[in-house]
Amino acid sequence: MPQATYHFPRGFLWGTATSAYQVEGNNTNSNWYKWEQEPGRIIQEGKAGLACDWWNGRWREDFHRAAEGYQNAHRMSIEWSRIQPAPDRWDEEALDRYIQMVRGLVELNMTPLITLHHFSDPQWFVDRGGWEDEASAGYFEKYVRKVVQALKDYVGLWCTINEPNGYAIEGFLMGAFPPGKKDIRLTYKVMVNLVRAHAAAYHAIHQIQPQARVGIANYYRSIKPTKSWFLLDKLITNLVAGFNRVFPDAATDGMVRFLGKRARIREAKGTQDFLGIDYYTRDYVSFDLSKWNEFFIYRQFRPGTELSSTKFLANEPTGMYEALKWGLKYNIPIIVTENGFDDAEDRIRPRYLVEHIHQMWRGVNFTWPIKGYFHWTLVDNFEWERGWSQRFGLWGLDIETQSRHKRASADLYTEICRENGISDDMVKRYAPAALAELFPE
Ligand code: BGC
């Protein structure tokens, strides 16, 4: 029998998060499809291919896996390029498939949280200038209206754009996502257009469905100075941490602020009903003269931290607490829209899970308005420019055969969702190394 449990409030949402391009397969009208064909863009020339084969119906078995694991919610996204394969064409059959999927969630008693844009764009939209063009918000709004009209009977929780800060930076500053540009002015321009698009979507959704709850999944990266006594490291920390604030600030007061530039987007003011936080990891930053081509910023993980299989992430659970505490200033409910670890062997993930959920519980215990947690992800999926090199799933995937295998973390997460909390008994069995810290004698 458990001796102690960290309990969550009744009705807390427990789920996993997925995104269309990463799980559906064969999204041939998306800009990512074209990007994948270009040599050198994806690690090991990976291709999404069939991905998790959801478009052919495997979403059914995966949703069952989630429901059997006591998950009561699921975050998934709609692929714009499927709904609107060409500027003058709506694909009703595709829309119908999404209706079936979302209805499938509801029938399994899982609350859907629907993301309307998760990194991928229709190729026609990109050809017309994409997010660099001011017309982008108008195009996006039309698509959003179409989707919301179709799904409104089943969905009340919407995320307009996934990690708009990450999207703009990866695509327009770092060049890792399409269109592969490295232009800081363009990054700013894209951010402004994304704020416009979010605001247009927010108002459109509320017009169609006044009771809707609409937010953004904000990428929050914990940033610390390597030398806390060194002014330049502190300045760099503030600069980098500014990326976390751009979108939630703009959705609060209607001002886009980015590296000393600002733009007022009046219609964006007050356009967030909940704050979505995607938290994964923490960086330590320092001022480094040799990094002149990277704005003099040197980033590293804390020496000695546990790293994920591909050294992409460090296990820094207190960053979760920090992110939630930071989020309080927006004075709206908070949902952890993503959190996870690439760990093919599932060696660290069980501990990562309980440690992060424990940090979230600390906030809940202070009655912070935290309403749900979505683990990234249900089944291994296509990880963008990292292709298939990373394994984030509670369930593993064999890409050749499409067979799934359960990782211990899936069983652990099942127990967490069933119990609506973490018990010492669970920690003893799945992550004994975390026991002393989470349940001190
Ligand atoms: C993104 C996901 C991605 C995950 C892990 C998040 O930033 O929203 O699409 O798969 O990170 O890389």
Image (cartoon, grey):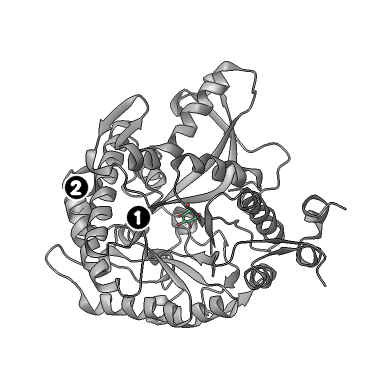
Q: Secondary structure at mark 2?
A: loop
Q: Residue furthest top?
A: 231
Q: Residue furthest right?
A: 441
Count numbered badges in the picture: 2
Where is mark 2, residue-wise?
A: 129
Q: Nearer the viewer, residue 257 or 372?
A: 372
Asked whether disc 1 touches disc 2, contact meaning CB atoms under 8 Å apart, the reply is no
User: Callout 1: few (<14), some (14-19), or many (20+) C-alpha neighbours within 10 Å?
Assistant: few
Q: Is residue 14 above or below residue 182?
A: below
Where is mark 1, residue-wise?
A: 38
Q: Can you give x and y, in whole percent of width and height, for residue 34 in the image?
A: 30, 59
Q: Can you give x and y, in whole percent of width and height, for residue 172 in the image?
A: 34, 40
Which quadrant of the rendered structure holds the N terminus?
bottom right
Some atom of ligand 1 lies within 8 Å of the CB belonging to the residue at label 1: no
Residue at image location 37% in from the left, 47% down from the top: 164
Q: Is residue 431 above or below residue 181?
A: below
Some atom of ligand 1 lies within 8 Å of the CB belonging to the residue at label 2: no
Tell me the CA gap for discs 1 and 2.
Answer: 20 Å
Q: Can you give x and y, in whole percent of width and height, for residue 363 in the image?
A: 61, 49
User: Callout 2: few (<14), some (14-19), or many (20+) C-alpha neighbours within 10 Å?
Assistant: few
Q: Is residue 314 left or right of residue 159?
A: right
Q: Can you give x and y, in whole percent of width and height, for residue 326 in the image?
A: 53, 39
Give the amino acid at mark 2: Gly
Task: Please tell me the numbered disc located at residue 273.
Answer: none
